[in-house]
Image: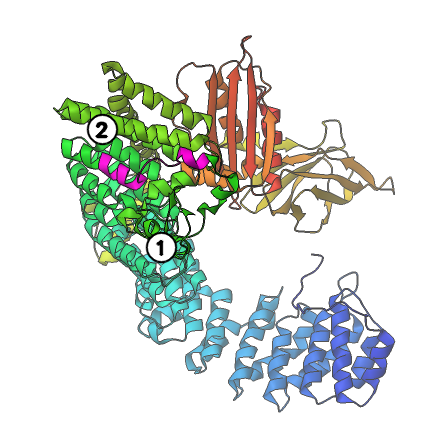
Amino acid sequence: MDKSCTLLVHYDKGTPAVAKEIKEALEGNDVEAKVDAMKKAVMLLLNGETIPQLFITIIRYVLPSEDHTIQKLLLLYLELIEKTDSKGKVLPEMILICQNLRNNLQHPNEYIRGVTLRFLCRLKETEIVEPLTPSVLQNLEHRHPFVRRNAILAIMSIYKLPNGDQLFVDAPEMIEKALSTEQDPSAKRNAFLMLFTCAEERAVNYLLSNVDKVSDWNESLQMVVLELIRSVCKTKPTEKGKYIKIIISLLSATSSTVIYECAGTLVSLSSAPTAIRAAANTYCQLLLSQSDNNVKLILLDRLSELKSLHRDIMVELIIDVLRALSSPNLDIRRKTLDIALDLITHHNINEVVQMLKKEVVKTQSGELEKNGEYRQMLIQAIHACAVKFPEVASTVVHLLMDFLGDSNVASALDVVAFVREIIETNPKLRVSIITRLLDTFYQIRAGKVCPCALWIIGEYCLSLSEVESGISTIKQCLGELPFYSVSEESEPTETSKKIQPTSSAMVSSRKPVILADGTYATQSAASETTFSTPTVVQGSVTSGNLRTLLLTGDFFLGAVVACTLTKLVLRLEEVQPSKTEVNKTVTQALLIMVSMLQLGQSPGSPHPIDNDSYERIVLCIKLLCHRNDEMKKIWLESCRQSFVKMISEKQLTEMAELKAKTQTTNAQPDDLIDFFHLKSRKGMSQLELEDQVQDDLKRATGEFTKDENDANKLNRILQLTGFSDPVYAEAYVTVHHYDIALEVTVINRTKETLQNMCLELATMGDLKLVERPQNYSLAPETSMQIKANIKVSSTETGVIFGNIVYETSNVMERNVVVLNDIHIDIMDYISPAVCSEAAFRTMWAEFEWENKVAVNTTIQNEREFLDHIIKSTNMKCLTAPSAIEGECGFLAANLYAKSVFGEDALVNVSIEKQTDGALSGYIRIRSKTQGIALSLGDKITLKQKGGS
C-alpha cells in the first residue's frame, strides 16, 4: 500500500456523491442531512478522492456542532485527510484543528473526550499532538473509566512516536502509578499494555510483585500477561522457570481463551513433561467443553502436534482424546481416530478397542444419517488395532462380522477385508471365524463383498464338516436349479421383462407367472417358493443372495462361485474317504457351473456373460472333470501363498514408514552434554529442573541445530538479467503453502545513482501480487534486496514476469531492463501420499479431468522408466514392489500424490516393451480440477525423455 490505513468501511458502489451536494448539505441546519453528508465525504476519502474544497466548509459549519454523531464523523474525516505537504511538513490549516481538539479534550461530556483521545491514537504528526499533551495527561484522572482507558492508549501512541519520549518524559512512571490505583478492568489492561510496549522492565516488575493476584485478573489483562511472558522468555530464556509457574496458575482461569493461550504458551516455552502434560490436559478439557466444531478441529490440530513431539505423554491421554468421538461431525471423528491410532500401546489397546466397540454398537441405532460412514471409519480403526496387536482380534472379529450384510457397501467391504487378514494372521481364530461366516453368509447382499467372503470360504474350510457346510451354504444361497429352463426360451422375449415384479403381485394372480429366478409357477406354487426378488427382507435363509445377484447379471460373482466350489471339491477329495460322496458333490458342482453358463447365454439374462467369467467357469469344469495333483497343488496352496506374501509385504512397508518417522537428528560433534544427576538443584522447583533437563537433552540430540541445506538454497536462485545489463538481478524463490516469497537482489553496475528504481512484476495463472511496487534509489556499484509476496490459489503452473525501471541524472527518460520469466513448478505444491486401493479406484471413477500422455522416451527398461516418472512427479507408487518385479515385457502401476490445497492427483502408468526394445504406452493423469491434470501432464511430457 502507498500509505497506512486506520479505517475500513464497506463502500457500496453506486452513483458517487458530488462534492457540491455535500457542501450544500453541510452548510444547512438539518442535522440528519449533515450526518449523511459527512458519511459521504468519509466514503469519498476512503476511495482515494481528496476533495480539498470541503475542508473550510467543515471547519466553519461542522466544527461548532454539538451533535455527538457529527463530532464522531468529523474525527473520522480528520483521520483520513492529508495533514502534511509533499515535503512532510504539517499544513498550516491544521492549526485550526488543534484548538478544537483541545476543547474536546476538556469537554464536559465523557463521550466526546473519549472519542477524541481515541482519535489521537491514530495521529502520527508530532506538531499537532505536542500542544495537546497537557490536556491528555489531565484525562488520566477523569472520573469516568471510558475517558481514562482511552487516555492511557493515547499516551502510549504518542510515546511511541519519533521523539515521543520527549513529549511525555515520565509517561511510564505515571502509567505505573495509575495502574496501581486503577479499578476498571479495561483501563488496567491498557495501562499494563502500555508498560509492556514502552517499558517492559516495569511491566515485569509489576507482574512479579502481583503473582498471587494474576489468576483473579480480568481476561483481557491475563492475555496481555501471556504476551509479555512470551516476549520476555524469548529475550531471557534462562528465566522462563518462574514465568512457567504463572502460566500453570492461569490454567485454572475461567476463560476458555486464556486457558487455550496458556496451553499454547507452555508448549512453545517448555519441553518439561509436567508442562506438556498440563497443556495436553487443557486441550482435552476444551475439546469436551467447546461446542463449536471449528474450535474442536483447531484443538485436535494442537493435540496432533503434541503427539508428534511428545508421544510418550500423549499416550496417557488417549482415552480423553477418544471422548471427542461424541461429536456428530465426521471430520472431528476422523481426526480423533487418526490421533488415537498413533498412540496405541500394549497398555492401552484393550481400553481403546473396548471404546471403539461401544461406538460401533451405537451406530446400529440408525438415528444419524451418516452412521454408515462413521461405522466404516470405526471398522478401519479396529482393523488397524488388530493388525498392530493381533491379541485383540478375538474380541472384535465376531462383533464386526455382524456387519457383513451392512447396507453401507464400503463398510461391509472393510469388514470382509479385516476378516480375511485376521483369519490368516490368527490361526487360532480360524475355526470360529469360518463357522460364523457360514452362519451369516446369507445376509451378505453386496456384489462386491460376496467374492471376498467366498474366497475365505474356499481357502480356509479345511475339515470335512467345514467343507461340507461351505458347499451346502453356497447351494442354499444359489437355490434350486436350473436358473433358466429350456422351456422358457420358446416364450416371447417380452416375458423375461416380467422378472422384476415382487412376489406379492404373483400371489394375487391365479394365472401362471414368472418368478424372480425365471421359472413358471401357479399361485399356490408361488406362495411356497423358496426364492424372492432382490427386495426381500435380509435374514431369511431362503432369500438366495447369490441367486439374486446372478439374475441381475453379476457373472464375475458366478466365476468366483465356480472357483470356490472347485477348491472345496478338491479339498473334499482329500478329507472325505467315501469316493461316492466326492463324485456326488462333483456332479452337483458341475451342474451349478453349467447352469450359470446357460443363464449367461440365455435371452432372459440382463446382458450376456463376459468372456473372462465364461473362460474361468469353463476352466473349473475342465479341472473337475480331469483332476490331477499338480493342478490341485496350484489351486489349494499357491493362492494362499500369494495372499500371505501380500500381507507380509504390507507389514514390511508399514514398518519401514514407521521407522522413517521415528528417525531423529543426532548430536553434533563437540556439543556440550549436561548430566541430570550432576546439575545443581539449589533454589529450583521440580518444573524448572525438568525444563532445564529437556533443553539439555534437545541440545545433546541435535534438535536445536537447524539443518539448512545451503546447496539446495543455491539451486533455487534464478538469474533474472544478463551479466552485461546495467542492472543485474537474481531472485531466490521460497514457496510456502499458500504464498511465494521472492527475494530479488539488485546490483547497480553503473557509476551513476539509479533514481526511482522500481521492480514491476506481473503474474499469469492463479497467482496474485500482494504489494504494490515501491521506488528506491540505488548508489553506484551497490546492491539491495527487494522482497515481493505472491499469493497462490491453486495447484496450477504459474508464471511471474516483469522488468526493472529506473532513471539516471543524465537521461530524463526512464530505462527499462526486461527480466527473465520465473516459472512456478507444480512440484512445490504436491507431495507423495498414500491411499487404499479401493479409495484410488473410487476417485479414478469419480474424477472428470483426464490428461492422457503418450510414452515417448529413450529409456528402455520398464522399471527404470517408472522410477524416473516417480522421481520427476514427486509421487508415491501404490502398486506393491512384488507386482512389478521380473521381466514380462509390460508394466502397469498406480501413483498418488496430494497437493497442499487438498487436491488428489492420480496417475496410471501402462507401458509395454516393443520388439525393437523401445517402450510404448500411456500415462493417464486424473484429478478433480483441470489445473493439476494439465500441469502434471506438461511436467511428465517435459521429463519423460530421461533428462534432468
Q: Residues within 10 Å of mark 2 (few under 14, many from 20)?
A: many
How far from the left and from the top, in percent, is residue 589? 28, 29
- Three-letter code for the amino acid on which mark 1 is drawn: Val
Which quarter of the figure is the C terminus placed in? top right
Q: Nearer the viewer, residue 605 or 147?
A: 605
- Residue under label 1: 267
User: Would residue 486 be seen by someone viewing this image from the given angle?
Assistant: yes
**Left or right of residue 618: residue 929:** right
Q: Image quadrant of residue 519?
A: top left
On screen, 713 above or below 774? above
Q: Does dot 1 land on a helix, a strand or a loop?
A: helix
* Helix, strand or loop for the magenta stretch, by majority: helix
Which quarter of the figure is the N terminus placed in? bottom right
Give the magenta-colored segment's residue range. 471-489
Q: Nearer the viewer, residue 17 or 746?
A: 17
Magenta residue check for 479 = yes
On screen, 217 above or below 596? below
Q: At x 45% / y 30%, what residue is drawn? A: 601
On screen, 945 above or below 644? above
- Residue under label 2: 585
> What's the distance in space between the residues labelled 1 and 2, CA to CA?
69 Å
Camera-side mark, 1 or 2: 2
Q: Does dot 2 land on a helix, a strand or a loop?
A: helix
Q: At x 37% / y 53%, what residue is drawn? A: 372
Q: Which numbered tag is attached to residue 112?
A: none
**Left or right of residue 394: residue 443:** right
Q: Image quadrant of residue 639?
A: top left
Magenta residue check for 238 = no
**Left or right of residue 582: residue 488:** right
- Three-letter code for the amino acid on which mark 2 is drawn: Thr
Q: Nearer the viewer, residue 69 or 141?
A: 69
Residue furthest left in the image: 577
